[in-house]
Amino acid sequence: MVVYVPDDYRAPDPGWPADLVRDNPLALLSTNGEGAPHATHLPVITRPGSVFEPGGVLLGHLNRANPHWSALVDGGPALLVFTGPHGYVSPCVYATSPAAPTWDFTAVHVRGSIHPIVDRSGTIAVIQATVRTFESRLGQNWDMTTSYRYFNEILPGVGAFQFEITEIDAMFKLSQEQRPELRQRVLRSFRTSSTGQHRQLAELMSRLDGADGSPAVAAECPVPPAGPGAGAAETLD
């Protein structure tokens, strides 16, 4: 499966996809299945000492009771999809007409080969690496040593794997198709939103465009012209 990425929406440098994956580690793992692909949401990290690029290695785990686990083929092709911040853009933001709504979003698709880990030591190593990664960045540096006995109790239900990266595609749709002044309006609208993902989009847009910190512009829909048929809905056919 290859993702379509228009040239305008390509990542400006390799650091952008790596940052998105680090900040949004819950991935969708998809592999071939009978009749339909298998798909499972699960946390993924870059293996300690590895790098997020082709040739690098990722680590993840899922529930062994999940039929997806038993369907994994060692060395088989697999896809990991990471979704970053996204948000709806109303034509009201553009303050111009005609216009059309859109959805700005960010995503990274990672293709490679998957290798289930079947031994206990390898599985516990993935669990420990995952805990260390997330506790250092997202937690409170919890000390897992007091829970090793519990880890061993639940270990039979954990299916760990390695994922060898062969290709990375990233899409950062941040209103690049719009004129600079309209992109600024979208940025400011996202910046003042109460939705966290919108503010994250604004940060990315600012990083991409070198946008200024000008005050936000209120989103106001243009008033339809008065006259016969005013306000009538237009069809798209």
Image: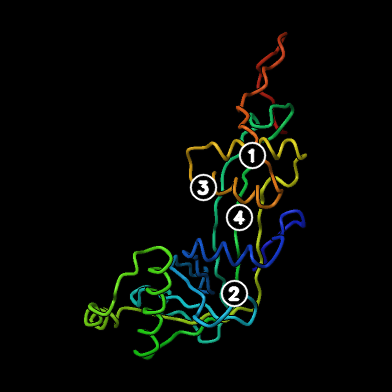
Residue topped by disc 4: 106
Answer left or right for 86 relative to 225.
left
Amino acid of disc 1: Gly
| Quadrant housing the C terminus | top right
Q: Residue placed at 72% from the left, 59% from the top?
A: 10
Q: CA distance from mark 2 to mark 3?
A: 24 Å
Q: Quadrant of residue 80?
A: bottom right
Q: Position of residue 210 (x, y in %)?
A: 70, 48
* Residue 103 vertical position relative to residue 118 in the rendered view, above or below: above
Chain-order first, disc 1 or disc 4: 4
Badge 3 crowding class, 10 Å Cα cut-off, few under 14, some 14 to 19, many 20 or more, is some
Badge 1 crowding class, 10 Å Cα cut-off, few under 14, some 14 to 19, many 20 or more, is few
Residue topped by disc 3: 197
Residue topped by disc 1: 213
Instruction: Name the mark on residue 158.
Output: none
Q: Quadrant of residue 87?
A: top right
Nearest to the eye among marks 1 and 2: give it: 1
Q: CA distance from mark 3 to mark 1?
A: 19 Å
Residue topped by disc 2: 52
Q: CA distance from mark 1 to mark 4?
A: 22 Å
Chain-order first, disc 1 or disc 2: 2
Amino acid of disc 3: Gln
Find numbered disc 2 in the image and state the secondary structure of the residue it sits on: loop
Amino acid of disc 2: Phe
Q: Residue placed at 64% from the left, 39% from the top?
A: 213
